[in-house]
Image: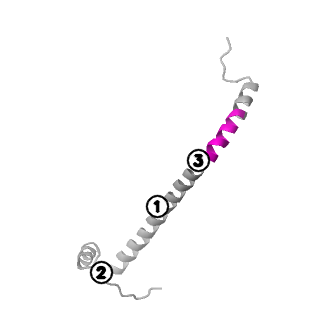
Amino acid sequence: MNKRVNVLLPEETIRVLDSVAPKGNRSRVISDAVLYYVSRRGKSKLAEQLKAGAIANRERDLEIAQEWFTVDEQTWQRSGNPNKVKR
């Protein structure tokens, strides 16, 4: 379902819109542009949140990795290191 809205756009924006929108198809181009913008903005926001979370948790994550490295190293040594070349 479509709904009519009135928006005010700068003349330059209208000129650009008219240069890319087929005659009588402004609404479709504007709709596509808004949906694209919102989609990209959402992905950018998610990337920012993930980065902030990684930075905030880096000390904890490093500690966990160091704890598991010791366990992995001990297991590797007990397993007899199957990739070791026997001579």
- Point 35% across, 75% down: residue: 29
Identify the element where label 1 is drawn.
helix
- Rendering quarter of residue 18: bottom left
| Residue at the disc numbered 1 | 44
Which mark sits nearer the N-terminus, 1 or 3?
1
Residue 55: where, in percent of width, then height? 54, 51
Amino acid at pointer 3: Arg
| Residue at the disc numbered 2 | 9
Q: Which residues are magenta?
A: 59-70
Label 1, label 3: how far apart the Cα atoms are = 21 Å
Neighbour tally class for label 3: few under 14, some 14-19, many 20 plus, Cα within 10 Å: few
Which mark sits nearer the N-terminus, 2 or 3?
2
Q: Nearer the viewer, residue 55 or 80?
A: 55
- Rendering quarter of residue 40: bottom left
Q: Nearer the viewer, residue 38 or 65?
A: 65
Question: Which scheme is used to colour this image of the protein?
Answer: one colour
> In this picture, is 71 found above or below 84?
below
Residue 83: where, in percent of width, then height? 66, 23
On the rendered structure, is 54 left or right of 74?
left
Prevailing secondary structure class for the magenta stretch in the rendered image: helix
Identify the element where label 3 is drawn.
helix
Amino acid at pointer 1: Ser
Neighbour tally class for label 2: few under 14, some 14-19, many 20 plus, Cα within 10 Å: few
- Point 53% across, 59% down: residue: 49
67 magenta-colored = yes
Quadrant including the C terminus: top right
